[in-house]
Amino acid sequence: MKTVKLTMGQALLRFLDNQYVEFDGRENKFVKGVFTIFGHGVVVGFGEALESYRGDIQVYQGKNEQGMAHAAIGYAKQKNRREIIACTSSIGPGALNMVTAAGTATVNRIPLLLLPGDSFACRQPDPVLQQLENPASVSITANDAFKPVSRYWDRVTRPEQLMTAMLNAMRVLTDPAETGAVTICLPQDVEAESYDYPLEFFAKRVHAINRRLPVKSEISRAAEIIKGKKKPLLICGGGVVYSEAGAALGEFAKRFNIPIAETQAGKGAIPWNHELNLGGIGVTGGLAANRIASEADLVIAVGSRLSDFTTASKWLFQNPEVEFLNINVNAFDAYKMNATMIVADAMETLGALGGALESVRYCSAYGDEVREAKREWDQEVDRLFQTERPDGLAQTRVLGELSALLDETSIVVGSSGSLPGDLQRVWRPVRPKTYHMEYGFSCMGYEVCAALGVKMAEPEREVYAMVGDGSYLMLHSELVTSIQEGRKINVVLFDNSGFGCIENLQNSQGIPSFATQFKFRDPESGRLNGPDMPIDYAACAAGYGAKAYTVRTLAELRAALADAKQANVSTLIDIKVLPKTMTGGYEAWWRVGVPEVSENPAVLEAHKAFKVEVSKTKQF
């Protein structure tokens, strides 16, 4: 057996550079680069390997460990999970900064390879700088915090362990059902230790991402259920996107006259103007989808996690005869809502199920109500887009301008605050992969950082991070990286001087505004209810080297957008929008913990209403 003597860090890099995936006959390189912020736990070991390596992996310098990991998630999501950028950090705080990103990747089923430095395996110099000591077990380090948010976790305490660790890492990263964050901890002494690795470990590996086929009995059961239903509803989830099954789902809907509702992850897979596409569903959904959903006697969820926002906390589907049919490669998701399951690829299942329904000439019993619901909702979106306020810019009016002025090939990126609700309701994508929303974790700070990753994945397209001021303040570190790398992104900052979305929730349950607005502390009341804080986000971004604009009128917005399109550097458009001018709920309910005891009568009334709605929810 031929071998080569390498440090563990050098062997890791050589292995990563030879991993490929194959999907539908298309082969491509899987690991395209490494994000890093060097610290003492990685710079001398794995860092030396990165510096001296002359292969085909690009190194990117992050500015915040969580931020660079969000960029890696954005990249992998935009690439339909078939290419990744790994992330490495020092031990301690540098590593722990990536835990939130690990949770974001795992919840959204996005492959993310994390390579945090770790404490010395030999333990001789303990405690080293930034080492977390646990008196109950000295084997526990800060990196154990990754365990609950990782789909696979390992610690390489001997250089030869790298081989099994990385084979298992690739097993999970390339599995459509099991993918998420993979954390391989690298003790800083072991990174530099050598081993005679077999050359076959570094041979080119092609990991086949296969379409899981439905079995005949699954299709038969599903077809039998659908045949007995008059008003089925399709839910288009993220699995439709990753299966590249948008066109197939649209055609399936037309063949059998079944309306479609979209989740955040599935939005954009089917053009908004498809005759049966009712738009967003659930808490952040629109009137058309939610009304049809409330009467549906069968819900066919295709590639959806069926989160509480999609199901309106299991409240939305009010037909007493409603049943659920879940099509998903992940059995855990397929089991939800006490559903009949097809554990298989979306594209393959739609083809097989379509054939079974065609053979019995199935057609739903819908008449004109679906198209009428869509027509009314389209009119409501048009109204929202034209909302005028004499005292300033309404958020929905700004979205209307953006919808009209952005190219249809442009990509919008979002994650948290009021914007995801507005975007799911009113944004009108006509091309796939132009709506990029992380709403599984709804992680504040994802937007700007992920926009960099999306731009790296789609360098020819304009990318717009749709972000509120609260989320922007939380994390926007990779705006600087975008400038450093010459990867232009556009930050569209909706500045309503606070955490507007969560303030709406607060107020809706009878609680007055409290610590949700960006105000100075009032010396008399002792509370944060003084004057608004006058934050100049454009000036801050300009200090980084971005081209920045401050917008208070439609004319200024139009001029800023036109100029930003021509810019060759990242831009930030600071739009001063009026608070509480986002979209509202459209016949949906969201379950939150409303206090049962309070001195505030409004809160007690909210709790009474809460109990009424709880009684209407499904109990599984």
Image (cartoon, grey):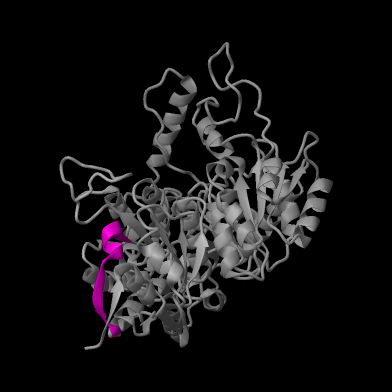
The one nearer the camera, 447 or 31, is: 31
**Residue 180 in view of the camera:** no
Q: Where does the image place residue 302, in percent across and percent down from the top left? A: 44, 68
**Residue 18 image position (x, y, % from top left):** 40, 80
Residue farthest along the top direction in this orientation = 524
373 and 326: which is toward the camera: 326
Q: Quadrant of the N terminus?
A: bottom left
**In the shown orientation, is residue 103 left or right of residue 72?**
left
Q: Residue at x 24, y 44 (%)?
A: 127
Q: Is residue 186 magenta?
A: yes
Query: Which of 484/25 is in front?
Result: 484
Which picture quadrant has residue 373?
A: bottom right
Q: Residue at x 78, y 62 (%)?
A: 566
- Residue toward you, 119 or 361: 119
**Which stretch did the figure color magenta?**
184-199
Looking at the image, the residue that sits furthest to the left is: 136
Rendered view: 497 above or below 275: above
- Is residue 116 visible to the viewer in this orientation of the structure? yes
Answer whether residue 91 is magenta in the image: no
Residue 619 drawn at (x, y percent):
32, 49
Residue 15 image point, x, y percent:
35, 76
Could you say which quadrant of the image residue 169 lies in?
Answer: bottom left
Can you say whether 145 is above or below 30 in the image? above
